[in-house]
Image: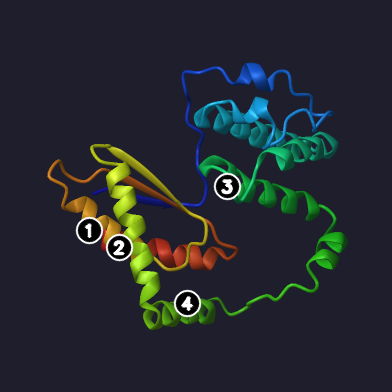
């Protein structure tokens, strides 16, 4: 099995044309569509996803060119469309929207530090990983949740040649060890598996990537 571990993901294309809807969305009028509006919810999941990807890329391009006003307008529109409780793409886009917003805030270090001054931070990455492993070993319910999640992934990805998993709280690779083993036992052979990890500390992602590559 070929396993790759990365920190970002590329958008996929679909045959529908939801950008016809996007073309009517003005970045200066962010309330035109919202996650609860009928025009957005009436779209197919892949169409909603393409709109969100387009907005995220638009925001990132504005940031890269230094057009922070337009980037802010894109974030305003995204804030009406993403949701941590929505469908898969809305949840993923919510994290990317937050990351882009933090990237803009870092343009003003004083403002960024002031807004994050009261947040508890863990400077010892190894200690954080160790605590999470202890928690995993002490509470079997987590292992059960991993088992059920992996079973759902296997059923949904049956017969697929390429599988992309996004771990929004990447730190403990135990779940993906089991998934790799399950994919290796498929009669048709394992798929090409890509795992994208999201974590505040790159050191945690590096450790997880190293352990996953060794397992694969």
Q: Which mark is residue 181?
A: 1
Nearer the observer, disc 2 or disc 3?
3
Q: Residue at x 85, y 37 (%)?
A: 69
Nearest the viewer among 109 and 9 is: 9
Q: Between marks 2 and 4, how big is the CA–CA gap?
A: 16 Å
Nearest the viewer among 197 and 44 is: 44
> Residue 165: x and y, percent?
41, 49
Choose the circle earlier in sequence order: 2 or 3: 3
Q: Residues within 10 Å of mark 1 (few under 14, many from 20)?
A: some
> Residue 38: x and y, percent?
66, 28
Q: Which residue is mark 3?
A: 91
Q: Between marks 2 and 3, how big is the CA–CA gap?
A: 24 Å
Q: Residue at x 64, y 46 (%)?
A: 83
> Residue 125: x and y, percent?
55, 76
Asked if the residues shown at circle 2 and circle 4 are in contact, with their CB atoms under 8 angstroms apart, the answer is no
Q: Which residue is mark 2?
A: 177
Q: Residues within 10 Å of mark 2 (few under 14, many from 20)?
A: some
Q: Secondary structure at mark 4?
A: helix
Image check: 15 left or right of 38?
left
Choose the circle earlier in sequence order: 3 or 4: 3
Q: Which residue is mark 4?
A: 132
Choose the circle earlier in sequence order: 4 or 1: 4
Q: Secondary structure at mark 2?
A: helix
The image quadrant that residue 117 belongs to is bottom right
Nearer the observer, disc 3 or disc 4?
3
Q: Between marks 4 and 1, how big is the CA–CA gap?
A: 22 Å
Q: Between marks 3 and 1, how big is the CA–CA gap?
A: 27 Å
């Amino acid at each position: 099995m070929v396993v790759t571990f990365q920190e970002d993901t590329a958008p996929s294309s679909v045959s529908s044309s939801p950008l016809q809807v996007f073309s009517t969305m003005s970045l200066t009028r962010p309330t035109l569509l919202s996650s609860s509006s009928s025009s957005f919810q009436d779209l197919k999941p892949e169409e909603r996803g393409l709109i969100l990807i387009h907005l995220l890329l638009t925001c990132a391009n504005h940031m890269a060119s230094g057009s922070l006003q337009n980037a802010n307008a894109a974030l305003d529109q995204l804030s009406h469309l993403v949701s941590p409780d929505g469908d898969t793409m809305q949840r993923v886009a919510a994290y990317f929207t937050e990351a882009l917003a933090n990237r803009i805030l870092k343009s003003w270090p004083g403002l960024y530090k002031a807004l994050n001054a009261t947040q508890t931070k863990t400077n010892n990455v190894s200690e954080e990983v160790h605590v999470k492993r202890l928690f995993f070993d002490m509470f079997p319910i987590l292992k059960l949740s991993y088992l059920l999640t992996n079973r759902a992934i296997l059923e949904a990805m049956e017969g697929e040649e390429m599988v992309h998993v996004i771990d929004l709280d990447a730190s403990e690779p135990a779940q993906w060890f089991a998934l790799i083993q399950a994919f290796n036992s498929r009669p048709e052979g394992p798929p090409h598996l890509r795992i994208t990890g999201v974590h505040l500390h790159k050191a945690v992602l590096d450790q997880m990537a190293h352990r996953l590559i060794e397992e694969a």
